[in-house]
Image: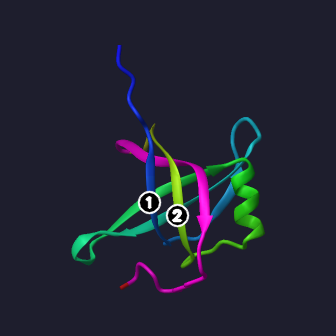
Amino acid sequence: MHRGLNVWIGSGNIASDLSYGKTHGGDDACNFRLAVEQAYKQVLYVRVNIYGRNVFACERNKLMKGDYVSIEGELMNRKGQEDTLTEVRCKDIVFHSRNRRESYGNR
């Protein structure tokens, strides 16, 4: 049996307001959509889920829509309303300069 490698690394601007809450187990959690610019100015939107100590780092840095971050994590699937959703479970987050664009994603 072969095991695969599940690592996702990406960077971009936060394209939605952060949603804070708790998991069913009571752990801190937050999520947002990350806008990753691809070739030819196309934008890929990725949902990022953050847990534990990284949630406190987001709060401490007052992370918000428009901020530029780098994410390292793993892909995960969960059942959505219509289909299976693929998301990134954040393992590490790097906060870059505050290049806030309040209208990002509305171009």
The residue type indicated by label 2 comes to: Ser
Dot 1 surroundings within 10 Å: few (below 14), some, or many (20 or more)? some
Is 30 left or right of 32, judged from the image as shown?
right
Magenta span has 87?
A: yes
Q: Which residue is mark 1?
A: 10
In the displayed structure, would residue 98 be above or below residue 54?
A: below
Quadrant of the rendered image containing residue 64? bottom right
Question: Tags 1 and 2 in contact by the CB under 8 Å rule?
Answer: yes
Out of 88 and 106, give the one closest to the viewer.
88
In the displayed structure, would residue 5 be above or below residue 36?
A: above
Helix, strand or loop at mark 2:
strand
Residue 24 location, x and y as percent? 70, 37
Residue 16 location, x and y as percent? 53, 70
Is 99 left or right of 54, judged from the image as shown?
left
Residue 1 location, x and y as percent? 35, 13
Quadrant of the rendered image containing residue 38? bottom left
Pick whichever of labels 1 and 2 is earlier in the sequence.
1
Mark identifier at residue 77: none
In the displayed structure, would residue 105 be above or below residue 8?
A: below
Q: Which residue is mark 2?
A: 70
- Residue at image position (42%, 58%) is 46
Quadrant of the rendered image containing residue 66? bottom right
Out of 57 and 31, give the one closest to the viewer.
57
- Residue at image position (73%, 71%) is 61
Residue 8 location, x and y as percent? 43, 49
As measured in the structure, the alpha-carbon distance from the residue carrying label 1 to the one carrying label 2 is 6 Å
The residue type indicated by label 1 comes to: Gly
Task: Pick the quarter of the image with the C terminus.
Answer: bottom left
Out of 11 and 48, give the one closest to the viewer.
11
User: Magenta residues, as a range?
Assistant: 82-106
